[in-house]
Image (cartoon, helix red, strand yellow):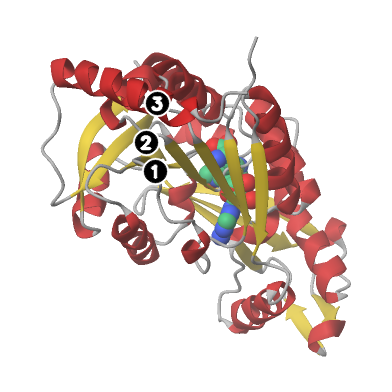
């Protein structure tokens, strides 16, 4: 059988200012009356491994629910976009991504995958794996912070779908969330789409269990951020002196994860030449995980220059995938026109690849 060569390139934006970004965020976050850290620092190699473990816990429903939605709707999503490029923000391990790549390959449109993640190991591993699995796929990995390095995404060479899965958009505060969505919207051409995964508001007991799994994996994931500070900033956090806290704030409709100091203590952060005091019971906020309603997603999209073209959910309405179009882009397609568009895009793609067959 004829094989088309796949290619990989990796662009790292973290090498230069990585350490300073962490130092500045720690200085800011620990100077606040209520201490906090941005969640992106969870994801060193161990944090990424622990996140994968969380996804396998029976209580943590988002990953398997989102996968189910993609299993049912990936084909339709690909037909709606005719995309030849998949740009994935916070790409992580590409298990769910394969469902979209498979649908694009089946439609004959798949050309390029752009995984974008702050965690170097996951970008390199997914790039290697996927280039071996998909004939002719060009993988352009970006190791960077999507809040600072969105300009690293290469210019589009066809129509593109930007995906942001897992409910990671919920890790932003509401204003930053809209600012970030707006920065994505600005990068979309009229035929491009954003596929946004969001966890939905539900029974607080279900939410509480998802962030307090019985095996203690989420607790280990939360505490691991202190190990990151110990290693990167020569701090001396004693992990056993902090405990994991996660609760659902019913008013704000978000999960809050915190680390609670078990005693009064002083922690040295050598690289910042500082000592941080924690009172007994004092809490450090490490993550927000906002839960959404259809209305909130539509309002966020509208405030960011987009409209929700399609809204996919599971039978229990536990998680949602929203296909968002630029607000001034073309009108939603009908199913009939979609099939015609996919067929045309498929033959266009085959013509493009013709020259590379060897
Ligand atoms: N999309 C995957 C992974 C979700 S976990 C899934 O749905 O399962 C969140 C991912 O976002 C992690 O891989 C983490 O490293 C990445 N991430 C978090 N903050 C980031 C940031 N500011 N810039 C780039 N990647 C980030
Ligand atoms: C990546 N993010 C969407 C996860 C979440 O559910 O907010 C991270 C996580 N935190 C605790 N468990 C999982």
Give the camera-side residue of 293 and 215.
293
Give the residue at x 45% y 58%.
172
Give the residue at x 83% y 60%.
227
Q: Nearer the viewer, mark 3 or mark 1?
A: 3
Viewport quadrant of the C terminus: top right
Q: Nearer the viewer, mark 3 or mark 2?
A: 3
Q: Is residue 57 visible?
A: no
Give the residue at x 56% y 25%.
98
- Which residue position is annotated with label 3? 351
Give the residue at x 23% y 24%.
341
Q: Are marks 3 and 2 in contact (CB under 8 Å)?
A: no
Q: Is residue 209 above or below residue 253?
A: above
- Give the CA distance from mark 2 to mark 1: 5 Å
Give the camera-side residue of 197 and 60.
197
- Which residue position is annotated with label 1? 291
- Give the CA distance from mark 3 to mark 1: 44 Å
Left or right: where does residue 91 sit relative to residue 23? left
Q: Position of residue 195 (x, y in %)?
A: 36, 38
Q: Are marks 2 and 1 in contact (CB under 8 Å)?
A: yes
Which of pointers 3 and 1 lies earlier in the amino acid sequence? 1
Secondary element type, mark 2: loop
Q: Which mark is on residue 200? A: 2
Which of pointers 2 and 1 lies earlier in the amino acid sequence? 2
């Amino acid at each position: 059988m004829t094989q088309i060569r796949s290619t990989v390139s990796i662009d790292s934006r973290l090498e230069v200012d990585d350490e300073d970004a962490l130092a500045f965020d720690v200085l800011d976050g620990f100077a606040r009356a209520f201490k906090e850290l941005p969640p992106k620092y969870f994801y060193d190699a161990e944090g990424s491994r622990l996140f994968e473990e969380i996804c396998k816990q029976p209580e943590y429903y988002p990953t398997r629910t989102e996968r189910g939605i993609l299993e049912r709707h990936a084909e339709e999503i690909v037909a709606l976009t005719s995309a030849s490029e998949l740009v994935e923000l916070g790409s992580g391990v590409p298990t769910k991504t394969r469902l979209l790549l498979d649908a694009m390959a089946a439609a004959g449109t798949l050309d390029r995958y752009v995984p974008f993640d702050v965690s170097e190991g996951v970008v390199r591993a997914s790039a290697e794996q996927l280039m071996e699995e998909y004939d002719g796929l060009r993988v352009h990995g970006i190791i960077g912070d999507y809040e600072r390095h969105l300009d690293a995404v290469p210019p589009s060479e066809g129509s593109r779908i930007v995906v942001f899965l897992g409910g990671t958009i919920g890790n932003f505060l509401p204003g930053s969330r809209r600012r970030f969505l707006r920065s994505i919207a600005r990068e979309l051409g009229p035929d491009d789409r954003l596929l946004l995964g969001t966890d939905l508001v539900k029974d607080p007991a279900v939410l509480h269990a998802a962030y307090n799994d019985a095996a203690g994996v989420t607790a280990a994931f939360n505490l691991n951020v202190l190990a990151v500070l110990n290693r990167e900033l020569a701090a001396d956090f004693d992990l056993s002196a902090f405990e994991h806290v996660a609760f659902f704030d019913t008013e704000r409709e978000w999960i809050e994860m915190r680390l609670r100091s078990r005693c009064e203590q002083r922690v040295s952060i050598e690289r910042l030449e500082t000592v941080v005091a924690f009172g007994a019971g004092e809490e450090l906020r490490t993550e927000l995980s906002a839960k959404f309603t259809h209305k909130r997603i539509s309002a966020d999209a509208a405030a960011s220059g987009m409209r929700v073209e399609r809204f996919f959910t599971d039978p229990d309405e536990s998680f949602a995938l929203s296909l968002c179009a630029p607000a001034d882009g073309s009108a939603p397609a009908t199913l009939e026109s979609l099939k015609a568009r996919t067929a045309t895009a498929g033959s266009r793609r085959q013509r493009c690849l013709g020259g590379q067959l060897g």
